[in-house]
Image (cartoon, grey):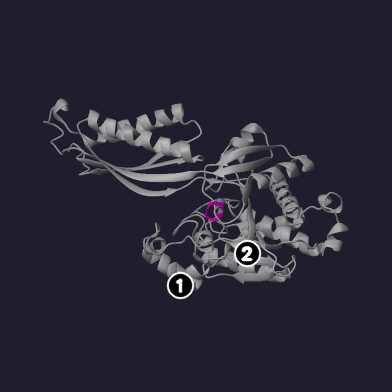
């Protein structure tokens, strides 16, 4: 094998290799028609008929291209190319074919189509590598049911509780798994020994405006943010909204509102690379004419840096306590969940940057504010992720759009990075 590789140094013949853009576009268009909503978007929520149809289409494509089809117990669908020597490790490439309801046609789909196209390019050029290649479509990245389900299962970090109390509801999960022919036992059998994996690479649309604003063609992700969530319960006292003097009220809405506003100010001033969100407030008793006795606040915040994350956590909790106190309220803090920030491999980031330079593509380093499957695998193997520009930053909506030229650039960066890593 070594002799063969030496006849094809990457710097010469392989560095001019490109994916077949027309072929990738044809596949992308076919895929976008599955679950199409008629307004440019797609609805392929996990294990829906449209999602299963897209997976079936993917399988047919894989087999048609002469690649090996594989599916694991978590339903992850893969194209496998044994281009390495016996017992070679596998370099995973991929993304997801599921979407949010009424989502866009690029989110996830681009990464899977680009991964498939990379495998086809390597196969048709009969390139021998030191690694095998696998293009994977992870199950339920979007979290209709569990969130990062397929990648967590593959990484062996899925817990029984994830399946017992899924965010999409237990009944929906059970029914969905049945439709997909999957079992709970099978989910846990999808775990792979980490020795088998050489790394994971993903191309994705940015879903934000950084690239558009900077004018860079490729975003090299330095880390995927960590996410922490809490339920804050501000507890006051129900009273007549007409006859109770303003000064006599223990109004739970005031603590909830004041701490929400203060959180925004704190994060913008002291944690400019982070974000905070209050996605929901629930009032009890909840009527025009009753002073709110209780407000439950759903608070979530994100950071790419563990130390900053910890500091932001304590600052936001202290702020909520101060605001509760200011209005005479009691505060209950319920911790809900946390995902640590996931740094991307520095080595892979460097290779991405080199490849971009050699392809003449401007690039910039950025943080992914959205979660992605790579974070499940970050403890397991080196991870690398690149973004291509989203027009107007739109995503999770039918108007989500990335120029085809940018999609092709991303796929070529993926291809050349694979060659450099696997040579
Ligand atoms: Zn996605």
Of 400 and 220, which appears nearest the observer?
A: 220
What kind of secondary structure does the magenta stretch mostly adopt? helix
The earlier-in-sequence mark between 1 and 2 is 1
Quarter location, residue 97: bottom right
Of 220 and 298, which appears nearest the observer?
A: 220
Say which residue label 2 marks.
196
Tell me which segment is drawn in magenta. Answer: 373-377
Q: Is residue 389 visible?
A: no
Which mark is in front, 1 or 2?
A: 2
The structure residue drawn at horizontal position 38% and vertical position 62%, both measured from the top left corner, is 161
> Is residue 42 found inside the magenta-colored segment of the image?
no
**Element type at mark 2:** helix
| 399 to 195, vertically: above or below | above
Say which residue label 1 marks.
185
- Does the residue tagged 2 have its C-beta within 8 Å of any atom of ligand 1? no
Of 13 and 409, which appears nearest the observer?
A: 13
């Amino acid at each position: 094998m070594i002799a063969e590789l030496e006849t094809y140094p990457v710097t010469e013949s392989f560095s001019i290799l490109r994916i077949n853009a027309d072929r990738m576009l044809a596949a992308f268009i076919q895929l976008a028609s599955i679950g199409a909503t008629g307004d440019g978007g797609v609805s392929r929520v996990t294990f829906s008929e449209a999602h299963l149809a897209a997976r079936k289409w993917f399988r047919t494509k894989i087999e048609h291209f002469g690649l090996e089809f594989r599916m694991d117990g978590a339903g992850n669908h893969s194209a496998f190319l044994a281009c390495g020597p016996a017992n070679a490790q596998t370099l995973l490439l991929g993304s997801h074919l599921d979407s949010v309801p009424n989502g866009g046609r690029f989110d996830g789909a681009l990464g899977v189509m680009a991964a498939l196209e990379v495998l086809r390019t390597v196969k048709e050029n009969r390139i021998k590598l030191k690694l095998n290649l696998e293009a994977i479509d992870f199950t339920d990245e979007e979290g209709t049911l569990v969130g990062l389900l397929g990648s967590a299962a593959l990484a062996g970090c899925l817990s029984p509780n994830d399946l017992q109390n899924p965010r999409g509801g237990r009944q929906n999960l059970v029914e969905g798994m049945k439709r997909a022919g999957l079992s709970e036992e099978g989910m846990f059998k999808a775990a792979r020994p980490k020795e088998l994996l050489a790394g994971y690479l993903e191309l994705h649309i940015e879903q934000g405006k950084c690239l558009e604003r900077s004018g860079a063609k490729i975003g090299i992700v330095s880390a995927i943010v960590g996410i922490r969530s809490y339920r804050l319960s501000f507890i006051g006292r129900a009273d007549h909204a007409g006859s109770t003097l303003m000064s006599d009220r223990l109004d739970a809405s005031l603590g909830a509102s004041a701490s929400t506003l203060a959180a925004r100010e704190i994060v913008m001033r002291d944690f400019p690379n982070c974000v905070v969100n209050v996605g929901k407030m629930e009032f009890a008793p909840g009527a025009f004419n009753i002073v709110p006795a209780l407000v439950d606040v759903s608070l979530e915040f994100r950071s790419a840096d563990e130390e900053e994350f910890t500091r932001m956590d304590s600052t936001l909790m202290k702020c909520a306590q101060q605001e509760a106190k200011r209005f005479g309220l009691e505060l209950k803090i319920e911790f809900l969940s946390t995902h640590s920030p996931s740094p991307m491999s520095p080595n892979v980031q460097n290779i991405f940057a080199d490849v971009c330079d050699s392809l003449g593509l401007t690039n910039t380093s950025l943080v992914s504010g959205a979660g992605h499957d790579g974070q499940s695998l970050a403890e397991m193997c080196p991870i690398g992720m690149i973004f291509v520009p989203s027009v107007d930053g739109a995503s999770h909506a039918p108007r989500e759009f990335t120029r085809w030229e940018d999609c092709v650039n991303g796929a070529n960066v993926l291809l050349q990075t694979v060659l450099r890593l696997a040579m």
